[in-house]
Image: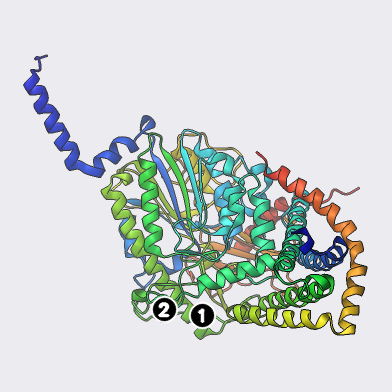
Amino acid sequence: MPELSRRDFLKLMLVSAAGVGLAGDRFLVESISAGDGNRPNVLILLFDAMSVHNLSLYGYARPTTPNLERFAGRATVYHSHYSGGNFTSPGTASMLTGLYPWNHRSLSDRSLVRRDLTERSLFHYAGEGYTRVGFGQNLWADLFLRQFKADMEQHLPPNSFSYKNLATLVSQDLPNDPTVAYYAIDEFLASSHNVFSFSHPGSALWGYLDLSYGQINADERSADYLYAMPSNGYSIYRHPELFDGLYSTFSRLSAQASPWFGYFHLFSPHPPYAPRREFVGSLPEMEFLFKKQHPLSTVHASWPEIKEKRNQYDEFIADLDFEFGKLMDRLESAGILDSTYVIITSDHGELFERGEYGHGSPLMYDAVLHIPLLVSEPGRRQRRDVYTATSNTDILSTVARLCDNPVPAETDGRPLPEFGGGEDADRSVFSIVSRSSSAFQPLEVGTLAMMKGEWKLIHYFGYQDYPVDFELYNLQDDPQEKHDLYSKDPSALAQLREELRDTLEDANRPYRKKGP
Amino acid sequence: MLKRLPSFASVLPLYSVIAVMAYGWTITSFLWKLPSWLLFLTIGEILALFAYAMASALGESLLILGVLLLASLILPAKWFKDEFNIRGAWFVMVAYGSIMVFLTLYASQDGFLGKYWTAWFAGSIGVALLSAYFAARARFMRSIALWLSDRLMVFLFIFLPVSAISILAVIARNLN
């Protein structure tokens, strides 16, 4: 090896320093984010209440998601991905525990998962070698993060990256009793100000002060928003600030020596739909397929009202997609995407049909269950598409694999196709809503949907004055679920019905009282 | 300084009025919410939640009493201290009761009243001050205040021990 003179050594140092300087942030991030034996980072970015039915990525006529489409060019796109539930609590819990709602038992509004699951969550299976970070902008999702805090290095409060608080969220300052303190203080004693429900606060004085605080902050008008400002009920946020905050967080995490796992549950496009002014009216007009009101509809909205809400929802998605595109560009420029798996998904969809808008009703039609899933892996530059049915219970096993950990045995899911799992055309995936059922009793009232191949069977059980037991649809021929084949295709029905009933029976068995 | 404070014999009856209102509201609201909690919280968690509620009710009632004691310190004795129990009871029943009415209407009308909170507050305080002024002069108002505060005192024998235990439970849950 030739000897290096002092002059050559100084030249080499000068050139190296200039190279580092020119490469800037990108060099810095790349050199440190690979960390810990080159294990990749894993980021789950979840958009609450995002239905595939309103995404141009999945064929919607309106161009709501050009940036998601661009991102799909480097990802695996799952076309038949379903949530375990049709609103936040069961849907999110299914993803975080890898279990269907009848197993994790988060069935009702703002409920918790089984207490013995607190150390069997997604964060646990990401493994201790990772810096695990959780952010639940939806308070009901944040409750799970409070349950799983033992397996998290950082738990960001739900009002992080917010523009203004509407309530005080005292329980954030009681880290040793985060769940009960939430129910006691934030949801009960001082609960009067919440845009989603109006109830008696448990403390008249505290509640009144909290209400006044919320009114003072909520009174602000913004020229940027025509309908309302985006809010999760406890704080007002704006997409640009939120996404700036996300970028800073991802950059900070990537600058650490260890790899990181991040679960970021964003509230948008959950109601209230609040697009910025420039997105209002930005999408072309389109005709929506009319479907008559369902007897179990809870909103009983008129058709014009549903159409108006749907327009606002689409505009809100377009607004969100715009910021998402900017975020991905920044992550790419910084080199973070080169060392990070990015999983884009939702916790449930959104329904605009049959007298209903929103989610969480007894109706289990495709739009409220069918959610996006894109997985981008480091270095991928081509799109892949997977059409067989997958469930959001699969995310836990997949993350365990991505983080180089064993796939847990106690899960209803399996690794996703292309990430350790295979495609299975005969697989049944389930989704259930049973809001009024106790977490400690058998499921008494609810709707259970089973998707298998081209078929979808919906079972209504326990509803008073509603005689229909089943509906059957062929999703391939009739993706809008207009033609109930229950009475027309008995051969297809019999086997599906038996499987669905067995599933419900198995779900209830552990909770039935044993006979004498 | 202490001479400017009312006697314990007139503080206690007034406190019993405040306590019954604060605890009564909290317990009623608790019972109203209980069915939904029973769906997903364990009995232990619900008891812990009740402990927070009782600790809060104690704090709230003491805070209101503290404000009234502060007023008696600041104001001329004739205005408030000399008729502390009677004037205080009427002030609390009207002002605190008015907040409760506002919150009930607010909840039942899906938050519609929220934007009128300042007007309601100003009106309530005005009416409460007037009723406190007339309370010491009108015989029936005087009788009502004395009769109520005397009979409500018995509830303190339940509320205070329950709150003491609750505070210990809340502290224990929040220790490292």
Q: Amino acid at mark 1?
A: Ile
Q: Nearer the viewer, residue A397 or A158?
A: A158
Q: Position of residue A390 (x, y in %)?
A: 50, 53
The residue drawn where x is 33% and y is 75% is A278
Q: Which residue is mark 2?
A: A226
Rendering coords of residue A276 (x, y %): 38, 72
Q: Position of residue A311 (x, y in %)?
A: 43, 77
Is there any visible trace of residue A109 in the rendered image? no
Q: Between residues A278 and A57, which one lies in front from this camera angle?
A: A278
| Label 1 CA crowd tier, 10 Å (few <14, some 14–19, many 20+) | many
| Quarter of image, res B121 | bottom right
Task: Please say if A403 is above or below A205.
Answer: above
Mark 1, chain letter?
A
In this rendering, would A103 be left or right of B54? Answer: left
Q: Earlier in the sequence, mark 1 or mark 2?
A: 2
Dot 2 falls on which chain? A
Q: Please tell me the numbered disc located at residue A306.
A: 1
Q: Secondary structure at mark 2?
A: loop
How crowded pointer 2 is (Cα within 10 Å; few <14, some 14-19, many 20+) is rated as some
In this orientation, which residue lies closer to the viewer: A274 or A445?
A274
